[in-house]
């Protein structure tokens, strides 16, 4: 197996750092899947998908070399500690000129980050971090494949994440859970109900991509407000579009797309109140 890549674009390094930082706030461990076309981050819990993030290698990296476990299975799966990965990349915020990422063997497999930092002197400084990883055996790969959910009860565009974040932060102070509802007219609603008050935020006229409704009714799911807030942190990458896909009272899937080079799938199970 071999993996080596390099970033020099300031925006790409910033986005990559922000992406890993958000991932580190969701779970302790993550799976890194490396292919010839992309790098993916996967987080699951008891074989249930939580987060799947796909990054196009051609957008982020000026150099990219990889060879997988075999010619037929040209992929690499690595398990690592997400927080350690985020801490290692934090140096990129210090006026970095470039970063090289390599799969190395230093008593154990590691992802090695070699960062060239700007300096007031003629010579630049170099910062090196080694993040221990576990090479995931092929027999476990199927556990970390992107989930395929062919049909949702409704798929609808979401309002701007920044606006939603302010609303959800306030709603979370009232209740630990909230309800998302949508209908085929393009109405999207956030709602909390407590003993003292019922509060809702309505967003009409949104694009509906698919809907299984056979009558005029809303489709809804109640979820953990904190989990929704975690997803809304993706506003930092300024996505082009975000869709909310709902299977009524079962699951909410939030799908973010940034110009085709960053795709985020976030799965939130519905809860019974």
Image: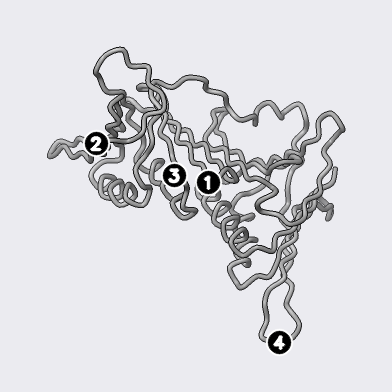
**Counting residues from the N terminus, which is met first, the one under dot 4 or under dot 1?**
4
Q: Give residue 85's quadrant in the image.
A: bottom right
Q: Which residue is mark 2?
A: 191
On screen, residue 47 above or below 242: above
Residue shown at 30% from the left, 50% from the top: 169
**Counting residues from the N terminus, which is met first, the one under dot 2 or under dot 1?**
2
- Mark 4, Cα crowd under 10 Å, few <14 / some 14-19 / many 20+, is few
Q: Say which element carries label 1.
A: strand
Give me the C-alpha separation between circle 1 and circle 3: 14 Å
Where residue 33 sits: x, y (%)? 69, 40
- Mark 2, Cα crowd under 10 Å, few <14 / some 14-19 / many 20+, is some
Q: Which residue is mark 3?
A: 231
Which quarter of the image is occupied by the N terminus?
A: top right
- Mark 3, Cα crowd under 10 Å, few <14 / some 14-19 / many 20+, is many
Mark nearest the camera among 2 and 1 is 1
- Of residues 265 and 80, the one drawn nearer to the viewer in this rendering: 265
On screen, residue 93 above or below 72: below
**Counting residues from the N terminus, which is met first, the one under dot 4 or under dot 2?**
4
**Counting residues from the N terminus, which is met first, the one under dot 1 or under dot 3?**
3
Q: Which residue is mark 4?
A: 121
């Amino acid at each position: 197996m071999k993996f080596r890549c390099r970033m020099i674009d300031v925006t790409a390094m910033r986005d990559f750092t922000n992406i890993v930082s958000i991932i580190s706030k969701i779970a302790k461990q993550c799976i890194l899947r490396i292919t010839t076309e992309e790098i993916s981050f996967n987080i699951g819990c008891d074989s249930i998908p939580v987060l799947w993030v796909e990054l196009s290698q051609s957008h982020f990296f000026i150099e990219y070399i990889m060879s997988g476990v075999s010619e037929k299975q040209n992929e690499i799966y690595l398990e690592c500690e997400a927080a350690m990965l985020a801490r290692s990349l934090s140096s990129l915020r210090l006026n970095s000129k470039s970063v090289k990422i390599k799969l190395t063997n230093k008593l154990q497999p590691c992802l090695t980050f070699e960062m060239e930092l700007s300096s007031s002197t003629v010579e630049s400084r170099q910062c090196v971090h080694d993040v221990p990883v576990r090479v995931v055996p092929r027999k476990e790969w199927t556990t970390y494949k992107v989930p395929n959910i062919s049909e949702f009860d409704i798929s609808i565009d979401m309002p701007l994440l920044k606006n939603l974040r302010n609303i959800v932060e306030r709603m979370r102070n009232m209740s630990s859970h909230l309800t998302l509802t949508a209908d085929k007219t393009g109405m999207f609603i956030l709602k909390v109900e407590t003993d003292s008050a019922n509060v809702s935020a309505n967003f009409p006229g949104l694009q509906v991509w698919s809907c299984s409704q056979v009558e005029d009714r809303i489709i809804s799911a109640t979820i953990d407000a904190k989990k929704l807030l975690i997803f809304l942190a993706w506003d930092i990458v300024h996505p082009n579009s975000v869709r909310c896909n709902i299977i009524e009272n079962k699951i909410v899937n939030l799908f973010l797309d940034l110009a085709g080079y960053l795709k985020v799938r976030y799965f939130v199970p519905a809860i019974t109140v």
